[in-house]
Amino acid sequence: MDPQFWHGRWERDQIGFHQQEVNVHLQNFWGRLGTPGNAPVFVPLCGKSQDMCWLAKQGHPVVGVELSPIAVEAFFTENGLTATRTDQGAFTRWHSGSITILCGDFFALRREDLADVAGVYDRASLIALPPQMRQRYAHYMAELLAPQTPCLLVTFEYPQQQMDGPPFSVAAAEVEALYRDSFALERLYHRNILDENPRFKEAGLTSLEERVFRLTRLG
């Protein structure tokens, strides 16, 4: 997917994917990862998610990565935070308190950018990517993470022909195929949530399964 697609979405404020509230699955299942309360955690394709604030309140230093500078600036402004900006490799590093967002391309990350990260939260990253990019993403994530690093992954599954992504439909079988070579996988939750999401019904969907997985980097 062309980075300009995402720049355009933020420039036009077409951000229906953004959740105003903290994700309920993060609150319900984060403890299943066993990540120490003071350990750094990583949020890929973070946008301006309130989930980062929730993680920081649990005591975690948070490292996000986000392509759009509009999204990054909005996060700090909307949360009343004054961020310092510095260059860090291919990124502009925005930092305030226990939250750091690296503004730039996820695929430009280096392992040293995620030093000491002990947990990952992916609610909006894998499902934001079209099929041809998802395998590259999963492989790159495996390269970035140290052995035994746990990840909380949230996905949607729906008849892809009924709606254009993003968010894209990612079947449970595809999640297993993407990650099984490098991660142990545990299914934590699944439920059809279509009745609770009228905008997806209006888009023509007949089913919308939400799934939550715990991944653990092998090695």
Image (cartoon, rainbow, N blue to C red):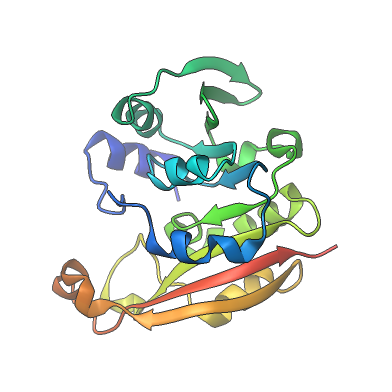
Q: Is 50 left, or right, of 215 in this rendering?
A: left
How many numbered discs, if any? Answer: 0
Q: Residue at x 54, y 64 (%)?
A: 153
Residue nearest the observer in this picture, 24 or 147: 24
Residue that appears at 62% across and 60% down: 151
Foreground residue among 20 and 9: 20
Residue 43 drawn at (x, y percent): 54, 46
Q: Is residue 67 above or below residue 189?
A: above
* Rendered position, 173 above or below 89: below
Q: Position of residue 160 (x, y in %)?
A: 35, 76
Tell me, yes or no, if residue 135 can be seen here. Answer: no
Residue 96 point in image, percent of width and height: 49, 23
**Residue 114 sits in quarter:** top right
Residue occupying image coordinates x 13% and y 72%: 202
In the displayed structure, 127 sits above or below 21; it is: below
Image quadrant where one finds the C terminus: bottom right
**Is residue 67 visible to the viewer in this orientation of the structure?**
yes
Residue at point 74%, 37% (across, down): 115
